[in-house]
Amino acid sequence: MAPLIAVIGCDGSGKSTVSEHILAWIGRYGPAASVHLGKQAGNVGRAVAQWPLVGSALGRLIRRKSDDVNNRMKEAKQPSLLPALVISAFTLRRRRRFRRMLALRRRGLIVVTDRFPQLEIPGAYDGPGFPAVEGGSRFVLGLARREYAMFEWMASHRPDIVLRLNVDLDIACARKPDHRREALARKIAVTPQLAFSGATVIDIDANQPLERVLDDAKAAVARVMAERGYTARV
């Protein structure tokens, strides 16, 4: 299949910006496409909130259920039924996008992803939404096992290169003032531990000016593309 380039990092590290620039730049090697492989709960909640009549109530419901899931992850408890269904819906949505990503690669398109599923750190971002505990209803446990199997399958597909953007907490908070500092701190602490099944991981200092970050990212990707036998068009 065609090369797969994943861009990961804490909120505020510049994932989306770097992904967009890499996508535009890598076209010199051949046809390319981008796929977002994160949960995107915030984006979905904001979009749903715009629906007429019921949007506001549904948007609040998604936010409440997301908070409930996060609290239960901290407490190592399985969520109740409605939050469990919300988790499952997001996982199915992520799997659909993952399948689309694979289809694009089979067609010969170079794919750049914003985020990538991981199983290495329970409870960390881009991992399963259900806690790894056995307590709870049989139905919810069944959903949890199904979700784990989906993540196991997704994580088995190793990117050709992972651009891991590392950012300091103060800078991340300045870039994302609407995010909770403690939540960003947890993500920053987890990021260096994500290895993505032994993929080639390139650490990039995302505290640098954007131009330096992009130069480092493009240099790393260019090396991998050369190893795969791709030549840039002049």
Image: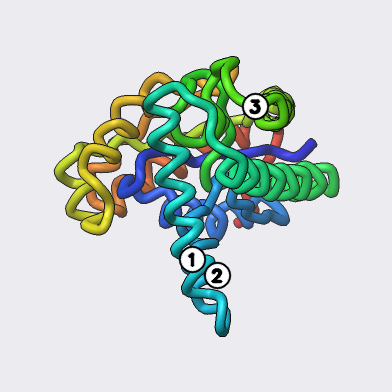
Residue 72 position, x and y percent, is: 43, 31
Residue 48 numbered mark, or none: 2
Classify 10 Å Cα crowding around label 1: few (below 14), some (14-19), many (20 and above).
some
Residue lying at 24% horizontally and 55% vertically, measured from the top left: 175
Of callouts 1 and 2, the N-terminal one:
2
Residue 104 visible in the snapshot? yes
Q: Dots 1 and 2: beta carbons under 8 Å? A: yes
Say what secondary structure mark 2 lies in: helix
Classify 10 Å Cα crowding around label 3: few (below 14), some (14-19), many (20 and above).
few
Classify 10 Å Cα crowding around label 2: few (below 14), some (14-19), many (20 and above).
some
Residue 137 numbered mark, or none: 3
Query: What amino acid is found at the position of numbered circle 2 in the picture?
Result: Val
In the rendered view, tell whether residue 75 sits above or below residue 221.
above
Residue lying at 37% horizontally and 46% vertically, measured from the top left: 215
**Distance between mark 3 and mark 2 Cα atoms:** 29 Å
**Distance between mark 1 and mark 2 Cα atoms:** 6 Å
Residue 149 position, x and y percent, is: 73, 25
Quadrant that contains the N terminus: top right
Residue 51 position, x and y percent, is: 57, 79
Q: Dots 3 and 2: beta carbons under 8 Å? A: no
Question: Image check: 213 left or right of 218?
Answer: left
Question: Image check: 127 left or right of 125?
Answer: right
Say what secondary structure mark 1 lies in: helix
Query: What amino acid is found at the position of numbered circle 1 in the picture?
Result: Gly
Say what secondary structure mark 3 lies in: loop
Q: Which residue is mark 1?
A: 59
Residue lying at 36% horizontally and 50% vertically, measured from the top left: 14
**Distance between mark 3 and mark 1 Cα atoms:** 26 Å
**Residue lying furthest front:** 137
Q: Nearer the viewer, residue 74 or 81?
A: 81
Q: Nearer the viewer, residue 226 or 67?
A: 67
